[in-house]
Amino acid sequence: MTEAGMASARFCANCGTALQGKFCTSCGTQAAAASAPAPSSEGWGSLSSEFFSSHGRNGIHSVALSFLRHPVDTIIRLTDDPTYRSQWGFLTATVGAQMTLIYVLLPRAFAALFHVPNTANSSAVITNEIVQYVGMAILTPIQYYVCRWLGTRKRSPMSYVKLCVLSVSYGALLSSLVAIFFFLLAVGLLKNGTAVDLGTLWQGLAVLTLIAILVFVTESHRRFWGMAWPIAIGVTISIAALSWLVVYPGLGALIERGGIAGAVSGLFGS
């Protein structure tokens, strides 16, 4: 699309979806109710300004509830909405909550309820957050150029960064809810004296969560890039394998060997 075309592009005032006709294909609002967004840079150089402009009209709670009701529709709507710029704050909140729940709060609660050793590990929170953010910085540019090559729609780097940030946020939100569900289920079973292998139960829930996230990423990428299903599935599985089998484990091992998490944790007295 030419610069003139980008400047004259119209967006739905109701949901933010880019308009291609007289009516919004997402919510049905008439094109007359649409307006052009304020001029802004969409290249890699706008990342820093985007990060520091993370507060918008859509609050964390309303966005989280929208994700739980309609995950794919929500991520496409927010990504295409030029007025939504709170994705960085949402990412920080969801990832921080996920790591704190899994590695600190739930282990402490379990230890207090059943009088067992406390396995809470604040260093693990820092390690996994560093791995998550650095991994995103490494993988997102790779994913962008692969998807741009295989997709049928032209998308800017900034819009894809937004999609990836919201994707990771949804994964963290879903994982947090699964962790809480597992904790409540485990406590209920143990309090009733039911014999159960908690390790197997957790692994089963983790696999189901992973499948749900892969389906979500596949469908959101298919719609965002205009990909065919086989291509979207192939891209998702390839990136997931690169992420979880190579990049994240490698970064985790590097951080552990360097003692980075322990040093940062010590600075905050954790």
Image: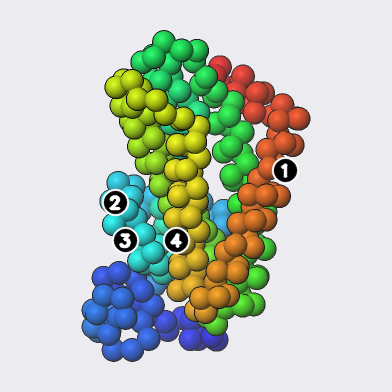
Q: Is disc 4 placed on a helix, strand or loop?
A: helix
Q: CA distance from mark 4 to mark 3?
A: 10 Å
Q: Locate the C terminus by quadrant.
A: top right
Residue 132, relative to residue 105: is it above or below?
Answer: below
Query: Nearer the N terminus, badge 4 or badge 2?
Result: 2
Q: CA distance from mark 2 to mark 1?
A: 34 Å
Q: Which residue is mark 1?
A: 250
Quadrant of the rendered structure where residue 34 is? bottom left
Q: Amino acid at mark 3?
A: His
The x and y percentages for residue 201 are 45, 36
Q: Residue at x 46, y 12 (%)?
A: 116
- Few, some or many C-alpha atoms within 10 Å of disc 2 (few <14, some 14-19, many ≥20)? few
* Nearest-to-viewer mark from 4 and 2: 4
Q: Which residue is mark 3?
A: 70
Q: Is disc 2 placed on a helix, strand or loop?
A: helix
Residue 190, relative to residue 34: is it above or below?
Answer: above
Q: CA distance from mark 1 to mark 4?
A: 25 Å
Residue found at the far top of this picture: 115
Residue 4, relative to residue 46: is it above or below?
Answer: below
Q: CA distance from mark 4 to mark 2?
A: 16 Å
- Few, some or many C-alpha atoms within 10 Å of disc 1 (few <14, some 14-19, many ≥20)? some
Q: Amino acid at mark 1?
A: Gly
Q: Residue at x 43, y 52 (%)?
A: 170
Q: Which residue is mark 4?
A: 216
Q: Amino acid at mark 4?
A: Phe
Query: Nearer the N terminus, badge 3 or badge 1?
Result: 3
Frontmost residue, 215 versus 11: 215
Query: Nearer the N terminus, badge 1 or badge 4?
Result: 4
Q: Residue at x 58, y 37 (%)?
A: 128
Query: Nearer the N terminus, badge 3 or badge 2?
Result: 2
- Few, some or many C-alpha atoms within 10 Å of disc 3 (few <14, some 14-19, many ≥20)? few
